């Protein structure tokens, strides 16, 4: 006879059932509302610009340039605020898109901000130079000397350009993460300086109270959300949950687990597969926060993370003392059972990507297969725990060990190999987790094994 949880599973995956439909509908409605708000504000900004003479004042090439310069400036300011909100940890955005997708949108939107800011600078300078009949260098010096807020705007623009350059793939790969992060923080100063240039001193606003009130409200709302969810909430939670490191366990060469205890952990609303941004309040570590997934399904009494030493911060984690205080922002991520669409699943982990997979294997019901890919036998962690899950819960576990450069190595995790391991792979939901290169490789091969994109869920261990 089916027990209650299995009955729920059977109900959930029966066919296109009401649970899935409701979940999908709620996400769709939220997505539509968000798009409406986003585009509605953009439309209102364009209307304000048009109503303020954006089109009617265009009489010649000079006024055309200044008008284009104004609208690109206004849209760049708007998208810069959206940029802040995308990573302000807004709970409904996190639930809808997940941290991963938000960072992808943040990257795309950042490019749009950069191009619009550059267009604004170029068009305004050209337009004013033609109107004032000055050469470009003379116009630049006149703008800087005679227009209030222009120095602030120039510094703000320089900071935004610096942030954008530091985010280009080549530059980012060369910069230590902490340096990249520090440069990113200056973007907030850049946006504050843009406000000084735009609202109290900008030509668009001086005589237009509606535009001034609207833009002030946009800036204020953004800062309120930012302070609420990036500053106040983590501080409040630190006091509310009082998390501490209870134990540091060596799992294998270069891998440690940290068990974290605290108060009211059951109220965090965690799902297996999610991650937190962890900050350890001990000397030399307190100023950095790093993402780590939970490596156990949440039980309400303690949390466990498992970390592979891969850089400066992770190498030192074995040295964290039990008793150290911890601040955790989260939970984040949609690499959870909630996005599953089919009763049968295959969880594929590359290397340390086993951490959320281990938690999911513990929590998921139904037909679950785990494929654990590691280069060397000694890199395998949780073997005893996975074998226990296999015995107690009927989870099928395949360990795929070996170097891809070894003879026959190119076959390892190929579409054919995946089909051999899981013959019905195309009828399952597939969860993939690992470092970005490995996740990309696995995704490609799973797709080639005929699994539709909509049934593949991925957690990449880098933003
Ligand atoms: C959602 C998610 C879940 C993760 N879960 C785990 C886990 O369970 N176990 C585990 O061992 N690793 C996990 N990682 C990877 C882990 O966060 C990085 O290995 C770690 O932050 C590296 O820091 P470092 O200073 O030791 O290394 P560095 O040499 O400084 O960084 C190595 C790479 O990690 C990334 N990185 C560094 N610091 C951060 C940061 N603060 N935020 C985001 N990315 C950063 C950078 O892209 C960098 O290229 C996860 C990553 C993500 C994005």
Image (cartoon, helix red, strand yellow):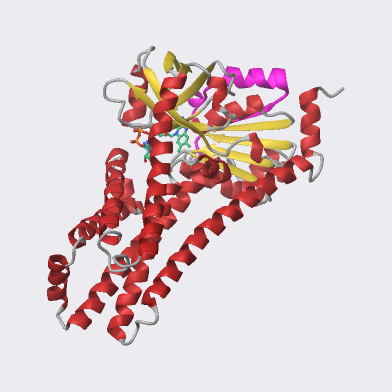
Residue 393: in magenta span? yes
Residue 249 percent coordinates (x, y): 45, 15
How many numbered marks have been drawn onto this rendered protein structure? 0
* On screen, residue 78 above or below 25: below
Q: Which residues are magenta?
A: 376-404
The residue at the point 36 percent across, 16 percent down is 324
**Where does residue 370 sit, x and y in percent of width and height?**
64, 31
* 151 in relation to 391, above or below: below
Q: Residue furthest bottom?
A: 60
In the rendered image, the quadrant that contains the C terminus is top left
Q: Is residue 413 above or below residue 77?
A: above
**Residue 177 relative to residue 397: left or right:** left
Image quarter for residue 213? bottom left
- Left or right: residue 135 compared with residue 226: left
Residues 201 and 172: in front is 201
Q: Is residue 440 visible?
A: yes
The residue closer to the viewer here, 435 or 83, is: 83
In the rendered image, the vertical position of residue 90 relative to residue 48, given as above or below: above
- Quarter holding ligand 1: top left
Q: Residue at x 69, y 48 (%)?
A: 25
Q: Is residue 411 left or right of residue 329?
A: right
Image quarter of the N terminus: top right
Q: In the image, is residue 127 part of the stretch drawn in magenta?
A: no
* Picture residue at 13% right of the left edge, 74% below the top: 137
Quarter of the figure with residue 216: bottom left
Visible in this render: residue 375?
no
Residue 48 in the image, given as x and y percentages of width and height: 42, 69
Q: Which one is nearer the viewer's eye here, 252 or 206?
A: 206
Residue 438 percent location from the top left of the image: 50, 42
């Amino acid at each position: 006879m089916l027990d209650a949880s299995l009955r729920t599973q059977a109900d959930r995956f029966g066919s296109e059932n009401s649970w899935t439909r409701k979940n999908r509908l709620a996400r769709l409605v939220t997505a539509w509302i968000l798009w409406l708000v986003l585009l509605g504000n953009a439309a209102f900004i364009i209307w304000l610009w048009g109503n303020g003479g954006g089109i009617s004042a265009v009489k010649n090439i000079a006024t055309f340039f200044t008008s284009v310069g104004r609208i690109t400036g206004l849209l760049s300011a708007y998208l810069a605020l959206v940029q802040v909100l995308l990573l302000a940890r807004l709970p409904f955005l996190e639930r809808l898109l997940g941290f991963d997708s938000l960072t992808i949108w943040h990257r795309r939107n950042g490019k749009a901000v950069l191009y619009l800011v550059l267009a604004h600078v170029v068009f305004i300078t050209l337009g004013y130079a033609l109107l004032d009949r000055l050469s470009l260098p003379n116009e630049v010096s006149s703008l800087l000397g005679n227009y209030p807020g222009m120095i602030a705007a120039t510094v703000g623009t320089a900071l935004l350009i610096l942030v954008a350059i530091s985010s280009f793939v080549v530059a980012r790969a060369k910069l230590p993460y902490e340096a990249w992060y520090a440069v990113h923080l200056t973007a907030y100063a850049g946006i504050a300086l843009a406000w000084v240039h735009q609202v109290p001193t900008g030509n668009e606003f001086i005589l237009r109270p509606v535009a001034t009130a609207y833009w002030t409200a946009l800036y204020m709302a953004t800062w309120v959300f930012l302070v609420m969810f990036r500053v106040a909430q983590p501080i409040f939670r630190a006091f509310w949950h009082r998390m501490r490191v209870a134990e540091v366990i060596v799992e294998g060469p270069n891998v440690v687990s940290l068990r974290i205890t605290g108060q009211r952990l059951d109220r965090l609303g965690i799902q297996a597969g999610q991650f937190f941004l962890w900050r350890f309040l001990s000397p030399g570590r307190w100023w950095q926060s790093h993402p780590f997934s939970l490596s156990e399904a949440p039980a309400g009494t303690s949390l466990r993370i498992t970390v592979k030493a891969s850089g400066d911060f992770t190498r030192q984690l074995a040295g964290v003392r039990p008793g150290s205080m911890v601040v955790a922002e989260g939970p984040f991520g949609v690499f959870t059972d909630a996005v599953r669409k089919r009763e049968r699943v295959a969880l594929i982990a590359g290397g340390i990507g086993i951490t959320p997979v281990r938690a999911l294997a513990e929590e998921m019901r139904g037909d679950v297969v785990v494929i654990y890919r590691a280069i060397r036998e000694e890199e395998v962690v949780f073997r005893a725990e996975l074998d226990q899950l296999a015995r107690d819960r009927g989870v099928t576990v395949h360990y795929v060990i070996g170097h891809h450069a070894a003879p026959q190595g190119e076959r390892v995790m190929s579409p054919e190999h995946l089909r051999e391991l899981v013959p019905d792979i195309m009828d399952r939901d597939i969860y993939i987790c690992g470092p970005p290169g490995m996740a990309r490789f696995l995704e490609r091969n799973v797709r080639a094994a005929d699994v539709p994109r909509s049934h593949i869920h991925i957690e990449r261990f880098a933003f």
